[in-house]
Amino acid sequence: MDNDFQAELELACSAVKEAGRKVMEKFGQRPRSWQKSPGDFVSAVDLDSEKTIAEAIEERWPEDGIMSEEDVNFGLEGERFWIIDPLDGTMNFLREMPFFSLSLALYTRNEVVTGVVYDPFHEELFSARKGGGAYLNGREISTGTVSELAECCITTEYIGYLDSAKKSRVLGRLGENFGNIRMPGSQALGLAYTAMGRFDLSYLPTSNAWDMAAGSLLITEAGGEVWAPGGYSCLKSGEITAGSSKLVRQFVEEVLEDEYRS
């Protein structure tokens, strides 16, 4: 096993590109889809993409486990496993809105060590390796230069899943503090955009490992910070704030306030 995980990163990049090619073959064709839970859809394209990525991993590293949003889950008690979101933004994909992504990360040594987020529509590949920086199509990226919350463009998702009291509270605080709020429909791609400064801050009140694992590594390797109540872990944190360290601290202290502070 390579200590620097370069081989794993290369495999991740090739796997999501191949799966992304197959995803784009189905774009605009109204593939079969069904609802897993209110507002949460999966399609045959999700499952085909998952299969393509899982097979690439199993061929190269058959001993590795896989955690995926959909059907493939095994070996999570082992030394290392991969975290897959085969199509993040399924609703956008089904409605022919070009904002969706594929996300793949390798988890070992109690942390994510490689992560890629691929936007197949725009052919943008975001990649990161622990200690090796973050990149977009081979060009090194860093979090944005905005330093004040009032100037931020912030991205968020899944506020509708919160209970009514918290939903009202969060929406109120966001509305009071920000004039530029985006809810793009793909958490992984929103984090990737934050890693390169297209967005200044990501606030995700409800998230899963496959949504945040690769994107969070992009953020930290791009010089930013990922904060969660009680300390960040992609396997345990359901709520995260990510961006430059200064903005994250300001957001936690001024917007989330006392009830969220660690």
Image: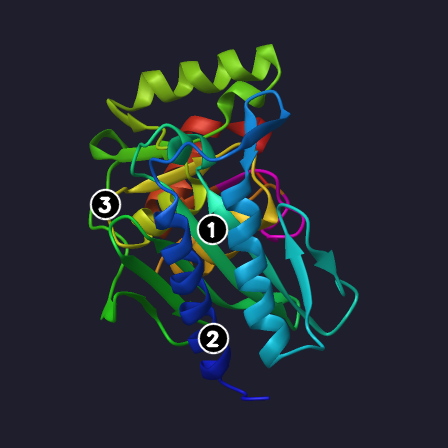
How far across and how far down the image is residue 138, in percent? 25, 71
Q: Nearer the viewer, mark 1 or mark 2?
A: 2
How far across and how far down the image is residue 148, in percent? 24, 37
Q: Secondary structure at mark 1?
A: strand
* Residue nearer the viewer, 215 or 240: 215
State yes or no: residue 101 in magenta: no
Task: Say left or right for 210 vs 28.
Answer: right
| Amino acid at dot 3 | Arg
How far across and how far down the image is residue 104, in percent? 50, 60
Give the crowd class for mark 2: few <14, some 14-19, many >=20 residues within 10 Å.
some
Kindly indicate whether the residue at mark 3 contacts the one at mark 1 (C-beta within 8 angstroms): no
Q: Secondary structure at mark 3?
A: loop
Per the rendered image, the range of residues in magenta is 230-240
State yes or no: residue 238 in magenta: yes
* Residue nearer the viewer, 29 or 20: 29
Q: Please, is residue 166 above or below residue 123 in the view?
A: above
Which residue in the structure is indicated by mark 2? 11
Q: Earlier in the sequence, mark 1 or mark 3?
A: 3
* Residue nearer the viewer, 184 or 29: 29
Q: Nearer the viewer, mark 2 or mark 3?
A: 2
Which residue in the structure is indicated by mark 1? 226
